[in-house]
Amino acid sequence: MTLNRKTKKKVYHTILHTILIALSVIFTFPFLWMLFTALKTPTELLQGTAQFFPSEPQWNNFITAITTIPFLLYLSNSLLIVLSVILGTLFSSTTAAYAFAKLNWKGRDKWFLVMLATMMIPLQVILIPMYIMYARIGWLGTRFPLIVPAFFGGGAAFYIFLLRQFFKGIPKELSESAIIDGANYVQIFLKIMLPLSKPAIVTVALFTFLATWNDYFGPLIFLSNPDQWTLALGLRAFQLQYGGRYDLMMAASVIIMLPTLIIFFLAQKQFIEGITFTGLKG
């Protein structure tokens, strides 16, 4: 018996969704394990994997995890650094990408290759020179080493490349029409390029948020005052103090992970569009 086209399509979608649901369960299992562990009692934790679900959820574990460390202080420090880095990264990456994509200047393609080559330099290679430089200008123990480089394209080579590909996909006739109407390059950038590049800009902002929010190495090297610690450093200090209380550790980890999940679900449409269009255009 031959299946018609409509039936084949239904079978195909059924198999596809079944596979996707199975994969989603696999990928969400670590988060579910962390959440259920955060809701267990110390007695249930001693049973190991014998009991996956908590018999009586201990929601007060989240309150305990927040109140045992200066959570709000660490949160405000993290937000200050994250928002500043996002602002600096968007400023430097969009302007540089616009110059590489739409402006004609001598040596443009050669300098673009040089910029891409910086992506192959490991952080460990430049860490000691950076540390010495910041020490000499008196920036150690401050937030400046974590924030200021973002305004000058520090670590943004991939974002510049991504935005350049998106800008190159915007028809040049729009820029030419704007020039005929009397617009300059700054006006074209602000009124045409940026509004049309919203998906790519959201993608860069999301990548920057994830990298900065989860950054442990940078604050560990450059921040010495506990009052300036971020949530990543605060979680490490919490682990050293309550390393045996896995319920509290998982509760703190869930709290720190929540902003990432919320932002991704709110911006997933623009994120997918930015990745897709960047790959198709250029």
Image (spheres, helix red, strand yellow):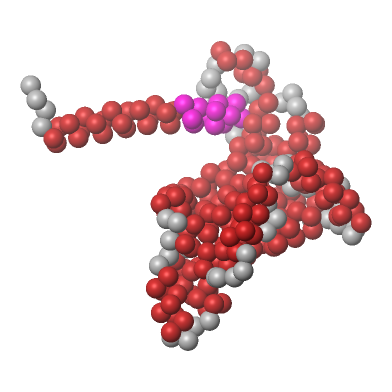
Instruction: Report the label total.
Output: 0
Residue sitting farthest toward the left: 1
Residues 172 and 243: in front is: 172
Image point (43%, 65%), residue name: 170
Residue 79 seen by the camera: no
Residue 33, quarter of the rendered image: top right
Residue 53 seen by the camera: yes
Most common secondary structure along the magenta stretch: helix
Image point (59%, 51%), residue name: 158
Image point (53%, 72%), residue name: 189
Residues 214 and 274: in front is: 274
Q: Where's residue 126, x and y in %?
A: 79, 46
Residue 199: within the magenta? no
Q: Where's residue 93, x and y in %?
A: 61, 60
Using residue 265 as the reference point, say whether residue 205 is left or right of it: right
Residue 30: within the magenta? yes
Residue 270, quarter of the rendered image: bottom left
Image point (46%, 26%), residue name: 26
Residue sitting farthest toward the bottom: 182
Using residue 1 as the reference point, say whether residue 28 is left or right of it: right
Q: Where's residue 5, x and y in %?
A: 13, 35
Q: Where's residue 252, x and y in %?
A: 66, 37
Q: Is 63 located above or below residue 264 in the figure?
A: above
Q: Is 224 located above or below residue 171 in the figure?
A: above
User: Which quadrant of the figure contains the N terminus?
Assistant: top left
User: Which quadrant of the figure contains the C terminus?
Assistant: bottom left
In this picture, which residue range is highlighted in magenta?
26-39
Residue 64, quarter of the rendered image: top right
Using residue 92 as the reference point, say whether residue 11 is left or right of it: left
Using residue 211 as the reference point, say whether residue 199 is left or right of it: left
